[in-house]
Image (tube, rainbow, N blue to C red):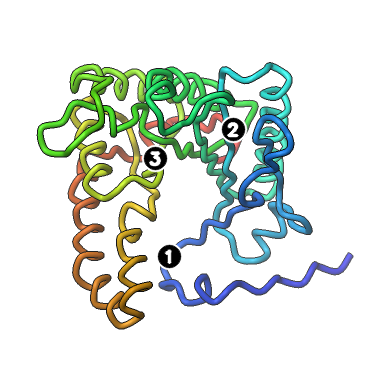
Amino acid sequence: MAARPRRALGPAASRRAKDAGLLLAYEESGYDRSVPGRLPRLLDQYTAARLKQAGADAVKVLLYYSPFSAAEINARKQTWVERVGDECRDADLPFFLEIVSYHDEMDEKGPDFARLKPEAVTRSIEEFCKPCYSVDVLKVGVPVNMNFVESTSLSRAPTIYSRSEAISHFKRASEAASLPFIYLSEGVDNGTFGEALTLAAEAGSGFCGVLCGRATWQDGVPIFVQLGASALDEWLQGQGVQNIQNVNARLTAARPWFEKWTTAPSGKE
């Protein structure tokens, strides 16, 4: 059988540094709001093998997951993750699973969900570290809503977690992970994400790094809209670089991924 033609990459992927790996998303963005459960969907006309042919060094899928959802909904999501994991294993590609915690009946940015978030994050980590999913790296939000953490340096909404309580939640979620995991910023600003990483360090969290975007560049969007591309370029070279350095300075507490991977839980070697 003739090999499938290699699919062309977009301009951004083609212009990356030569020694930079390429992580490609396999899921459709968003979800169908008319269907309960925020069910995930994969990109049409792709498989993990085809993503590898397109140049992927690893595959990522995003999953909205709530341990409080109906068992039928979660069973469908768990089966979906297993299928992606099987494809990645067969294609010999690392599988990054991004878990976004939520609740079907709550605003995930509000105080009610903030009280449930530590449990939601920890139980989700426990679930998807199981070998049946063939996940290699988890990408998770921090186990507290930082807008409700006691802070001496940043303005906050009414406090839900004391600083010591927040640290204990970081510690518990980290201890639940038998796989390497990295933190996503969940769209918070740079200062807030930096403080979250400081708490993670104080908790002795075993996180292996971060994979974030908006915490570094989102404040540049109004600069571009109001002042144009040249102003954005100036902002990126100044504040944008400073934002990345602010995150990097807190990564000294991150742990090597191979400390978690003393064995190959998914059968990959």
Q: Residue at x 21, y 31 (%)?
A: 199
Q: Amino acid at mark 2?
A: Ser
Whole-percent x and y of residue 77? Answer: 68, 30
Q: Residue at x 29, y 37 (%)?
A: 255
Circle 2 packing at 10 Å, graded few (<14), some (14-19), many (20+), is some
Circle 3 packing at 10 Å, graded few (<14), some (14-19), many (20+), is many
Q: Give me the disc on residue 182.
A: 3
Which residue is the extreme one toward the right?
1
Q: Give me the disc on residue 20.
A: 1
Whole-percent x and y of residue 126? Answer: 50, 20
Disc 2 vs disc 3: which is toward the camera?
Answer: 3
Q: Give me the disc on residue 266.
A: 2
SS at mark 1 in the image: loop
Left or right, residue 43 beside residue 147 = right
Q: Give me the disc on residue 215.
A: none
Relative vertical location of residue 184 with respect to residue 239 in this rendering, above or below? above
Whole-percent x and y of residue 163? Answer: 18, 23
